[in-house]
Image (cartoon, rainbow, N blue to C red):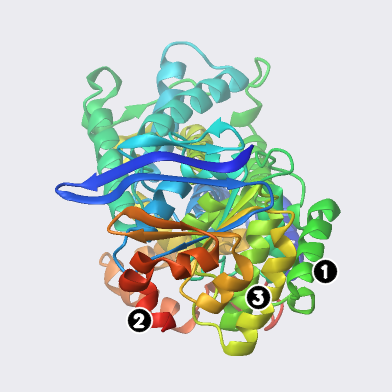
Amino acid sequence: MDRSLVTAAVLFGLLLAMPFLLPLIGSAYLSGLIIKAMLLAIAAISLDLLIGHGGMISLGHAAFVGVGAYATAIALENGVDDIFLLLLITLAVTGLTALVSGGLALRTSGLYFLMITLAFGQMIYFTLTSLAAYGGDDGLTLWSLATVFGSNVLQSGNGLYYLVLGTLFATWWGVYRISRSRFGRVLRAARDNPERAEVMGYPVVRFRLIAYLIAAMIAGVSGLLLVQHAEFVSPALATWQRSGDLIVVIVLGGLATRNGAILGAFFIVIVEEVLGSFIHEWRLIYGPLLVLMVLFAKGGISHLLTPKGAKGYAS
Amino acid sequence: MSTLEIRKLNKSFGALTVSRDISISIGEGQCHALIGPNGAGKTTLIHQISGVLRPDSGHILLDGQDITQMSVSRRVQAGLGRTFQITSVLPSFTALENTAIAAQAKSGSSLRFFRDASRETALNEIALSTLQRVGLADRAAIPAADLSHGELRLLELAISLAGKPKFLLLDEPMAGLGRSESVALVALLSELRGSLPMLLVEHDMDAIFQLADTVSLLVDGQVVARGTPDEVRADAAARAAYLGENAA
């Protein structure tokens, strides 16, 4: 049996049980942290489809989180609050944005692809800051949130927690299936040797663009959920530093391993929180800590949990 | 009807003409060899046939279908298989996966996102039988990165064959092979020859005399001699331009 499935079962089991365990230590604050980490993990897994499986290193992925969050926020401001409608709007807007930016960026690869995605990300960031009607630079506080069939179940109890967990699981499972499918195999072939993939009969750019669209839409959904959690949107969501954080998460957790993205996300959220509570200049410690992690946990945190010889390329 | 037909192909880079009115026609079950000194324009011609470069004028027909304006991948879909001069495989894939994904391109849509591709028995069977054909079946589970140079040349051929080509473009298949490996590959290619027409670019004259039905000699972007291997060998122009140094 695939060891990564066992790790995933343990991870999801723990996350599922958390709302029952947390009241014992009495902390709503902790469940907020977990939601934050899960949202980061969703976006990171989607980026891992691009980087880990597709070899496309994007430095503008957080922009899609921002686009998804703003699409949701603007729809909410205009009286749309049904979650399914919001989901449709988010998918459509992030999908279209990705179609345009991906269509252009994927004419290049490697460092040039990185630069173009960075430029697109910043363009989106500046576009968001210029939305004066929706808060501009300062962002926008939301007074109404998504409803499910007209009920406020997401604002009560653990409704949102389980929705985010469910989405994380769906993302994990979806990317797992995609990575092993015919499509995922072509994507990996194009990462390995694009010229060969082309001469096998695969139009490489088209396959990459589809992967880019899928990844962008997943990131958009994490933006939608982030709005429900934070009840606030700001252009800062889309900055390239956020995109960099996503890359750190998957490199730290381990490329092309969805468990790695989850572990990496929790690691970063926890370290930020713990260090941040001790000292103001926590990034002074955070930086060297990341360097050490990358040096000593080659292949990422999830790699440490996998026994030697059990590492399938497709896992 | 010819399987691959090249009609009056012209290509220049600025003042440098690399293809001059090249016409070659290769029929069902034929092996045509392309020879010529370095710089004669063999590689540019290969690039135009495979779609990396577009000709300035002229047409390329595969099985009667004009492929001149098609992309590289469309041409492969249309039935043009090729091997590379410098081995080109998927290093992190096993030999079986390399071959299976080539077969996948010709067996239904690859826009399938859910089913486990490595468990598609139909693809794996095609892959394994193709590996058997080139003599690599016992290396099926080895990642391509760990195969020897000779094995990679065979895998390269298996990848092309798994795509069920109507025509095979072989760009120096013997490059870098030892004596016994070359002999084995020539034997394998002569088995394929009857069922699969091919264009062979090769420096190994022994291989050409064993495999080719017809030969074109390319010098300065022009076909200066064509005919059976013996005719071309007998051609004085050929001796002077190329064979002189090699065959005398």
Q: Identify the chain of the residue marked 3, using the numbered disc in the image.
A: B
Residue A153 point in image, percent of width and height: 66, 27
The type of residue carrying mark 1 is Met
Are the residues under badges 1 and 3 in a single subunit?
no
Pointer 1 with pointer 2, Cβ within 8 A: no
Read off the residue under disc 2.
Answer: B245
Residue at 37 percent of width and 64 percent of height: A277
Alpha carbons under labels 1 and 2: distance apart = 62 Å
Residue at 52 percent of width and 72 percent of height: A300
Name the quadrant of the C terminus of chain B.
bottom left
Name the foreground residue: B208 vs B61: B208
Name the foreground residue: A61 vs A200: A200
Q: Quadrant of residue A126?
A: top left
Name the foreground residue: A88 vs A308: A308
Farthest residue to the bottom: give it: B179
Q: Is residue B86 above or below residue A258?
A: below
Read off the residue under disc 1.
Answer: A1
Residue at 56 percent of width and 44 percent of height: B4
* Residue B185, numbered label: 3
The type of residue carrying mark 3 is Leu
Q: Identify the chain of the residue marked 1, using the numbered disc in the image.
A: A
Farthest residue to the top: give it: A79
Alpha carbons under labels 3 and 2: distance apart = 25 Å
